[in-house]
Structure formats: structure tokens, C-alpha cells
Image (cartoon, helix red, strand yellow):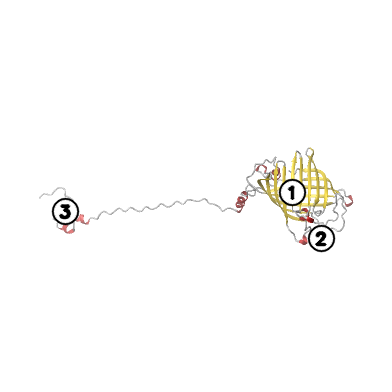
Amino acid sequence: MAYADTLAPVKPASIDACVALASNADRLACYDSVFKPSALPVVQAAAVPEPVKKIDKPDVQPETFKEKVVDKVSNIKVIGKAPTLEPTTSLLDQRWELSEKSKLGVWNIRAYQPVYLLPVFWTSDKNEFPSSPNPNNTVTEAQNLKSTESKFQISLKTKAWENIFGNNGDLWVGYTQSSRWQTFNAEESRPFRETNYEPEASLMFRTNYELLGLDGRLLGVTLNHQSNGRSDPLSRSWNRVIFNVGLERGNFALMLRPWIRLEEDSKDDNNPDMEDYIGRGDLTAFYKWKQNDFSLMLRHSLKGGDDSHGAVQFDWAFPISGKLRGHFQLFNGYGESLIDYNHRATYAGLGVSLMNWY
């Protein structure tokens, strides 16, 4: 029996069936069909997730105290957006460098209060017995004074720190000195009757709002010391915290200054009732007309009855020739100087204005 050249594939069988086969080739093929391992299912490897890329967050530094204050200040409604001011037309901008255009940097000396020399300064009532509730500050012997004397005042300020809070807030330091000089009192050797020294530091902010037709331009606080530098019984002094509110419109400016006196030990207080005479605040109106400067100052104790005291002062600076300007001053009320804080009189002076106020 002849074998075919090609054997037919053997179907899988049992081991016993394979043993019964006579042909070695068939038996081997049978064993292979029984014992050949079945194809294992291909197991796909689990996809390994790619590591999540870490997104670097910006390194945010904690907000500093100054930044917090700047943010608070800039969000105060009364501060407002910086107005567009022209230093040549805005009176308060000329005086306090409020806009960016008018900023001059620090340590530039400029005029503060009016600077003048009044060779003739007359009073209606000489104060020859200065007094105070403190017995140590009451004069018992009459001073030999003349009704006519001379008066002069110097007043300067400079900016010590600019733009403290972002683009706003400047620290100014100022000094004002006014003297009453008995130039016509040859009998007493022409003494200086009274000199008042007034150093101060002010933190001023630019504002932008409207009130009663005026533009609110300035808000500030001032720490002020004023004294006459004399010994008892003529010593007079006090310390104040002064609040400043400045408004303007065109050639008109208005400055409101309420203040709080810093209390002293009663036994060392030269003038415990100072506020009841010089007052608890003042209001100064300024108007520029051509080359004339007019100012009117009002102050009051803000009390009634026997404690109602105050004062009014009018100043007029006028052109004479070229840059030479005259100065006229009229005062009525209490406190023309510290030694006269509780003395009422009328004063009138005439002289020259040495520096422009605005």
C-alpha cells in the first residue's frame, strides 16, 4: 500500500487513540495534537499613565504692610483718581506740589506762611500784665511797652519724603517764626517783646472731589509745636494735632484746620485755657486778583457764653514796583501772639511782603 506524499492533518485525539496508531509519523502527530499547548490569549500590558506634569505657579510674595496701606489709601473714595492740574493755575497745587507735573523732589526750600516785614505795627491795647490761670505764669509788675512796634515773620517748608503711598502722600517739615520788636522803645533798649517759634511736620494727601462748588484738593494731618522760648512767668507753649482740608476753585482757595491740643501735666501747663481763647480751629480764605493777594483768617473757641472767644485777621499783599510788594495786616480778637493768647486787642501793621504765599 503506497503512502501519499503529503499526510493529512491529524485531528486531536486521546492518548489511547495515539497508542493504537501503527505509523510512527501518525503517532507523533497525534501526540503533538494532544500535548501541544493551546495558544494563550495575548494579554496587553496595562498602560502606565504618564506622570502629571507639575505646573509651576508664580512665586507670589506675601503683600507687604506698605502695599496694604497703599491699596487702602488708593481705594478711599475721597482720594479719587489723580486730577489733571496745571501748576500755573491751581493755587493748592502750587503750594503743596499735588500733581505729578508740579513735583520738585525733596529738600527744596520754599515759602510756607506769609513772609513779611512790618516796620510799623500798632495795637489799641498794650498787654502790660500778661496772665494765665497758672499762678507761675502771671506777671505782677507792669511792663513798660510802647503801643507801636515792628513785626516780621519768616516761614519756610520743605518736602522730606515724596509719594509715600504709591503716587500720593508727601511728608513736609516746616518752620515759622514771628517777632514783635519794640523798635521805638529806646527807654527799654528796644527789646524783642515776643517771638513765637513754630516747627511742625505734615503728612499731605492729594484728593479729588467736589463740595459746594469747590474742588477738594488736599487732606492732611500736622503735628505742631508752638512756644515763645521764655522762662516763667512769661513762658507760653502748646502742642497740637492739626487736620487740614483744602478746597479751591479758580483764584480762590479755602483751608479748614480743626485741631486737638495734646494735654500736659497741669502743674507744668503755662496756659491751660489756651483753646478757649486762641480757639479749636481756623478757616482761611485766600483770593488772588491780578497781582494782589487777599487772605482772611477766622478762628473760634467753638464755645458759647463767657467762653466764646475768637479772632479775625486780614492780610493784603499788593504790588509797589517790579517785584517789590507791600503788605497790610489787620487783626482783631484774642491771641495775636502767644503771650497775648487771652488778651483782646486790635492790631494794624504796614510794610513789605518778602515772598509770595501762593
Q: Which residue is mark 3?
A: 26
| CB atoms of marks 2 and 3 within 8 Å | no
| Residue at the front extreme, as displayed | 305
Q: Kindly identify which numbered label has been placed on residue 283.
A: 1
Left or right for 145, reference 174: right
Which amino acid does the dot numbered 1 rest on? Leu
SS of the residue under disc 3: helix
> Looking at the image, is mark 3 or mark 1 earlier in the sequence?
3
Q: Nearer the viewer, mark 2 or mark 3?
A: 2
Picture coordinates of residue 192, whole percent (x, y): 83, 51
Instruction: Report which quarter residue 253 is drawn in.
Output: top right
Q: Nearer the viewer, residue 138 or 50?
A: 138
Left or right for 124, reference 48: right
Determine the CA span between mark 2 and mark 1. 33 Å
SS of the residue under disc 1: strand
Q: Nearer the viewer, mark 3 or mark 1?
A: 1
Picture coordinates of residue 166, whole percent (x, y): 62, 48
Q: Nearer the viewer, residue 4 or 142?
A: 142
Q: Which residue is mark 2?
A: 136
Q: Residues within 10 Å of mark 3 (few under 14, many from 20)?
A: some
Which amino acid does the dot numbered 3 rest on? Asp
* Residue depicted at x 76% and y 46%: 296
